[in-house]
Each structure stands twice: as structure tokens, then as C-alpha cells.
Image (cartoon, rainbow, N blue to C red):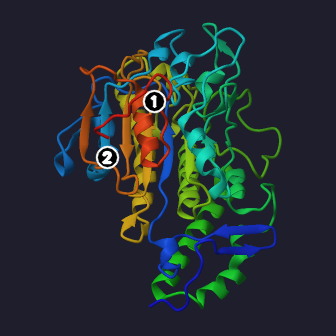
Amino acid sequence: MMKHPISRRRMLRGLGVSMALPWLESMRASESEKAPVRFGVLFSGNGFHSKEWWAKGEGKQMELGQVLAPLKGLEEKMLFVRGLYNAEALKGNIHSSQTGNLLSGAPLASGGEIRSGTSIDQLLAQRYGASTKVPSLVLGCEKSNPSVHKNYSMLYSSHISWSSPTTPTPLELYPALAFDRLFKDEASKADQSVLDAVLTDAGRLRRDISTGDQRKLDEYLDSVRDVEQRIANAGKRGQLQGWRPTLDKPNMARPADGIPQDIAEHMRLMADIVVLGFQTDTTRISTLKLNNDHSSLRFPNLGVDYMIHHLLSHSDTADWLKVNQFFLEQLAYLAKRLDSIQEGPRTLLDNTMLLYCSSMLTGNHEARQLPVIVLGGGGGRIRGGRVLDYREKPDRQMCRLYLSLMDKMDVRMKQFGDATQPLDEV
């Protein structure tokens, strides 16, 4: 039973720290009866196994190719979309020009110039950013590549989020700083735990909420503590990602804060930070780039340490399938975490549109159709459990999907990229 109604904008506060609350039953009815819709993007580069990226059927009976096996159990909340593409991605080279406009459909400048288009996530951030502490959370797990490949900047291969046509949105690679941005009033290194700073205020709040909400508050605080502890331990493992260092052992003490060298832990930490951002309504827009297109990540955690991601993608080996499934496991982890959090009659996943995509369908640079999955209900506006196939249909611009997703968040545009009409089926 509710003790005292509390405001949806109620924050837990401590010295230099403010922490938004998750959805609670004790919040005033007028503020809590309708949770906001969130939009998230997960990206992995270089496509997938050519024979195992497929889905067919509907609902619980949907069959999944081996790449999608980690999504088992999420079929009823999934749209599997085939046949969409970006016409501009077929121009230029085989990596940068297929990635830099993935979320905008814009033409890309070649040579030394950097020019793309404002991406869908940043357009939504412009609309909803004023409603949240963090307008958009743009995270990455692999550093940007500043080189040039076939006359196009590799910055295009390193960024899918663009704040303006000439500005790729800066990637936050450090879990500690991403965490600070959500909860600290100034995102900087500090010795005091965020959670410890707000425990006194949390104790006061606990007296004013229902027993059920007390349990939900405790679970939320436990999840914040878990992320804090994992960030603190993230640099203590020795699995190296990406390029090979010239030393077998470091010749200096490792900094306390940094990029985790265990790539699996790095990705899970970033996914958990997205969950916290959505759960507390600290942000409603997030983009997580798991790796670059033309990626140099290695996967010692999978027993696949002999070849970088980009080179693995060029053939349909068992190891390539294993790496594909690893990336889909990150999507499944994030989706299931969101689906475990109740917001009134729906789950947080039901109130989210989670887009998963890559720069090409397969590792041989096939971009005439793109791999696309949408998980979540968009606040009740998306019916999952379906396969949408546009391969034989006209007007199959990827930007039509973006118009549809923006429409679910009440952002309506006459044109986005090369599209003027949304997809009616979404």
C-alpha cells in the first residue's frame, strides 16, 4: 500500500551526486501512469555469417538461424527485418561509406572532408534531451580509427551517431566516466562511491514508500552497487583486445580508471549503464557501438585469438559464427535486463525500441540489404513476433524504418534521408 505519493522527479541526493529513481508505484498517478518511450541502438561491424542470419515464422513458433540463437525466448518481442538498405552506402568504398551514414542515409563526403548527416538518435535527443539529465548516451567499446581507407575517412567506420552533418558524436569508451555522467553532478573522477553518497537520502525515502517499492528500490540500489564494483575491478583482468602491444608485460603501473581489457566485461558494463540510464529516466536515448566497422578486436575470451574481427568476417567459419553469437549475446543480455524491470503494466523493454544493426549483411561487404532487428514494444505501439521482408518490394529505404520509429516517439518528419514515407507494417 502507498504511504505517501512522491514526485516522478524525486532524486536521491548527496554531495556532488544526484541519482534519479526508477519507476515506483508510490509516484503520483498522473506522473507515473505512462512511462516514456526510450530508443536504443546497438551496432556491430562487418556483418554476419551468410547462411545463419535468418528468422521465419511468427510469435513463439518463430525459428531462428544459428547467429540469432542467443535471442531465444525474445521472439514475441522482436521484429526481424529483411531487405532494407541505404542507397548512399553503395557508393564510395566498402567500409566507411557503408557505416558513416547507417543511421541517417545521408551522402558522405570523400577525400579529406568529413560530412554525413544528423543521425536518428541525435534527432530524437534534440526533441527529448531537455526532459532528461543526459540528452543522449553515446557509448563505444573500441577506439575510433582516424586513418583513411579507399579515399574515405575511417572516422565514418568508427561513428554511427552524428550530432550534425560534420560532427560525429563523441564516444564514451570508459565505463567509469559513463557511470559518472549519469549520476555525478560533474562527470569527473571522485573517490566517494555514488551509492554511498545517497544512502542517507535513500533511507529517508524508504520510510515514505510502499513495501513493494522498498523492495524495488533495494534491487535498484543493489544493481548500482554491482556496476560500481565491476567498474572498479574492470582493469584487473589480462585479456587484450584489438592491436597487439610491443611488451608482454606492462612497464608501468596500470591506471586505476581505464578501458577494460576484458571485452566481454566491457560490453556488459556498457549495457548495464544503458539499463540504468533508461531505468532512472536519466536519458531516453542511447547508442552503444560494440565495435568498429573494419574492427581490430580480438576474442581471446572465445578461444578465437588468432585473427582480428575484420579478417574473420571474410569467410563463414565456425569461429566467425562463434563471434557473431557473442555479439548477439550482448543484445540478448541488454534486452532481457530491460524486460526484467516492471514499469506499471509493462516492462522497460515494452517501453523501449531497441534497434540492432550492422554496416553490411555479410563480411563480404554485402550492403544491398542490411541486417536489422527491433526489440521492444515502443510503449505498446510495436507488435513483435514478426518477420518483415522487403527484399522484393519497392521503396525499401532504411530511412523509412527510421521514420516509423520516430513516429512511435511522436516525432514526425516529412523526410529523413532518402525516405518520405514510414513503413506501414512497423
Q: Report whether residue 326 is seen.
A: no
Q: Foreground: 193 or 38?
A: 38
Q: Report whether residue 116 is seen.
A: yes
Place of residue 144 in the rendered image (x, y in percent of width and height, measured from the top left) = 67, 29
Which residue is painted at 69% across and 25% down in the image? 166
The span from disc 2 to disc 1 (Cα, nearest Å) is: 17 Å
Q: Earlier in the sequence, mark 2 or mark 1?
A: 2
On the image, numbered disc 2 is attached to which residue?
A: 78
Q: Quadrant of the C terminus?
A: top left
Disc 1 marks a residue whose amino acid type is: Ser
Determine the secondary structure under disc 1. Answer: loop
- Give above or below for 263 relative to 90: below
Determine the secondary structure under disc 2. Answer: strand
Disc 2 marks a residue whose amino acid type is: Met
Which residue is painted at 78% across and 62% down in the image? 185
Q: Foreground: 12 or 5?
A: 5
Q: Which mark is residue 389?
A: none
Q: Foreground: 343 or 62?
A: 343
Q: Is residue 296 left or right of residue 339?
A: right
Q: Is residue 94 left or right of residue 191?
A: left
On the image, numbered disc 1 is attached to which residue?
A: 358
Place of residue 305 in the rendered image (x, y in percent of width and height, measured from the top left) = 51, 30
Q: Quadrant of the N terminus?
A: bottom left
Tell me the quarter of the picture where residue 138 sits.
top right
Q: Residues within 10 Å of mark 1 (few under 14, many from 20)?
A: many
Place of residue 312 in the rendered image (x, y in percent of width and height, measured from the top left) = 45, 22
Q: Residues within 10 Å of mark 2 (few under 14, many from 20)?
A: many
Place of residue 117 in the rendered image (x, y in percent of width and height, measured from the top left) = 60, 26
Which residue is painted at 64% across and 19% down in the image? 154
- Give above or below for 169 relative to 70: above
